[in-house]
Amino acid sequence: VENKAITKSDIVNEIKKILILNNMQYSEQNKNELQQRAVKSVIERSIKLIEIKKNTFLEFSRDDLNKELNRVASQVGLNLEKLKEICASNELDFSIIEDGIRTNLLWNSLIFYYYRDRISVNLDEIDEQLKLNQTKKEYNEYLISEIVIKRVESDKLELELQKLEKVINEEGFDKAAIRLSISQSAIKGGDLGWLNENQIGKNFKSVIFNTQVGSLSPPIFLKDGILIFKVRDKRKIEEKIDLEELKNQLVNNEKTKMLNMYSSSHYDDLRRSIAIKIFDE
């Protein structure tokens, strides 16, 4: 990647990290998928680091790093010390996980610095959503994956969607996401995890609500891409909502969605401008 070599050892360590952080077992069946995910992840991190090093003013707080480390551990049902032990027992230097999180925090700072003036939230829409939640006691949660592909000209759209559908049918949604998606979720096979309906933007909520479990949503046209969801599961939960807390959450979700959009677009521009050479053994 440019003048930085990615070694076989880097890929092996990335595979170990993917297995540990996703509670997965290595097998011959998932070998190729893991290699693709690992290569894509290491390339992405290398490209981000190239850009980060050009902007030496970027910073993050140690508190944010610790919070993210603890969040990553809790996602696999562990505390931080236990996660470190598991890494050590699998001969994975824990600093590799820490460095990856540090890179993402610096990248997020970079994106915010470049695009902060373009972030705006429609508070009237937020207030409308809050009104709908004033008397609700039961909420939907959805287990969702996504694929985001680049926008194409209208005369090529149908063919592009047919190609994507063919890859999904032949390889499965997660492998298609790893190979084709331009979203940051691609390295996790497009997995977004369980999302409460209050975490889902107004423009997406009705699409997800009307998509049957196990099915794909219709394409959603974004400014810089085409988004397709897969609804893997659905459940109802009872939850008492603090409206002020929910308002802050909705505002933050909208800001995060916009930053993610700018992040994908910025990364895609960098990806096209940086030389990547792959040498087969």
Image (cartoon, grey):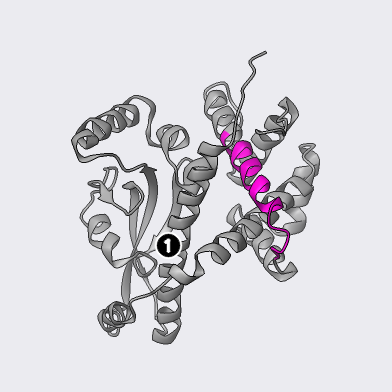
Q: Is residue 133 left or right of residue 26?
A: left
Q: Position of residue 206 (x, y in %)?
A: 23, 61
Q: Secondary structure at mark 1?
A: helix
Q: What amino acid does circle 1 point to? A: Lys
Q: Residue furthest top?
A: 281
Q: Is residue 204 left or right of residue 194?
A: left
Q: Which residue is mark 1?
A: 257
Q: Is residue 276 left or right of residue 10?
A: left
Residue toward you, 53 or 101: 53
> For the magenta stretch, what is the residue range?
40-59
The residue depicted at 29 percent of the width and 85 percent of the height is 134
Overall secondary structure of the magenta stretch? helix
**Alpha-carbon neighbours of circle 1 within 10 Å: few (<14), some, or many (≥20)?**
some
Residue toward you, 10 or 19: 10
Residue 132, by quadrant, is bottom left
Quarter of the C terminus within the rendering? top right
Q: Position of residue 49 (x, y in %)?
A: 67, 47
As drawn, 167 above or below 77: above
Please say whether residue 49 is one of the residues in the magenta stretch. Answer: yes
Residue 169, by quadrant, is top left
Please say whether residue 136 is one of the residues in the magenta stretch. Answer: no
Residue 114, by quadrant, is bottom right
As drawn, 74 above or below 153: below
Q: Position of residue 5 (x, y in %)?
A: 72, 30
As drawn, 156 above or below 76: above
Q: Position of residue 191 (x, y in %)?
A: 45, 47
The residue depicted at 40 percent of the width and 60 percent of the height is 195
Quarter of the N terminus within the rendering? top right
The residue depicted at 30 percent of the width and 83 percent of the height is 127
Residue toward you, 105 or 34: 105
Total numbered labels: 1
Residue toward you, 198 or 105: 105
